[in-house]
């Protein structure tokens, strides 16, 4: 291979890699934009909270997770229980929730649910502060205890 062929090969490879990263960036950006514009879907006595991604972590350490999914994250508030999904669907009664927390970092707006009967927590990224506030208010009305961050979000 001559020097010109090698240079052309490297340039072509860099263009292919750059186009791939651009496609990934635009896909993630469009999903976040769609999530920011979405609203809670109310059905009967329940409500489906739209999520961009969901994570399973440990209680008290929400920034470390042992599983994540952006394929079909689920948070549904039924009349008598919560349905949440990262990799598999879990159903828990509202009295099993030991704390509802709120975490916001660059690009994420998370609702954190900790359960009294488990060492794991559920973290749902709504990508929308108003959506997270509405969901946390609904959880508070169902009797779930709120963290100081969640309370501050609701109050102001």
Image (cartoon, helix red, strand yellow):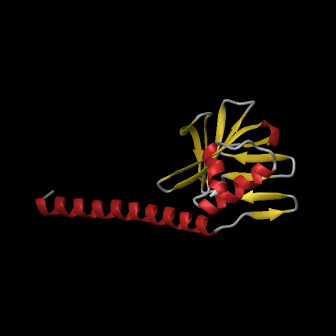
- Quadrant where the C terminus lies? bottom right
- Residue 124 position (above or below residue 32): above
Q: How many numbered dots are placed on residues in this image?
A: 0
- Quadrant where the N terminus lies? bottom left
Given residues 115 and 144, the one toward you in this image is 144
- At 56% from the left and 64% from the top, the residue drawn is 31
**Image coords of residue 40 (percent x, y):** 72, 63
- Residue 43 position (above or below residue 62): below
Q: Is residue 28 left or right of residue 12?
A: right
Given residues 40 and 30, the one toward you in this image is 40
- Residue 40 position (above or below residue 141): below
- At 65% from the left and 45% from the top, the residue drawn is 86
Residue furthest front in the image: 155
**Image coords of residue 54 (percent x, y):** 62, 48
Given residues 105 and 48, the one toward you in this image is 105
**Image coords of residue 27 (percent x, y):** 50, 64
Res. 124 in view: no
- At 75% from the left and 58% from the top, the residue drawn is 48
């Amino acid at each position: 291979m001559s020097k010109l062929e090698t240079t052309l090969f490297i340039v072509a490879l860099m263009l292919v890699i750059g186009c791939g990263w651009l496609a990934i960036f635009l896909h993630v950006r469009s999903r976040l934009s769609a999530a920011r514009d979405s609203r809670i879907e109310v059905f009967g006595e329940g409500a489906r909270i739209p999520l961009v991604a969901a994570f399973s972590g440990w209680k008290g350490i929400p920034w470390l997770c042992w599983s994540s999914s952006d394929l079909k994250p689920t948070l549904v508030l039924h009349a008598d229980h919560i349905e949440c999904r990262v990799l598999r669907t879990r159903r828990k009664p509202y009295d099993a929730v030991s704390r509802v927390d709120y975490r916001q970092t660059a690009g994420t707006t998370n609702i954190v649910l900790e359960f009294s009967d488990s060492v794991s927590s559920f973290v749902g990224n709504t990508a929308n502060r108003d959506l997270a506030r509405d969901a946390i208010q609904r959880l508070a009305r169902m009797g779930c205890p709120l963290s100081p961050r969640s309370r501050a979000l609701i109050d102001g």
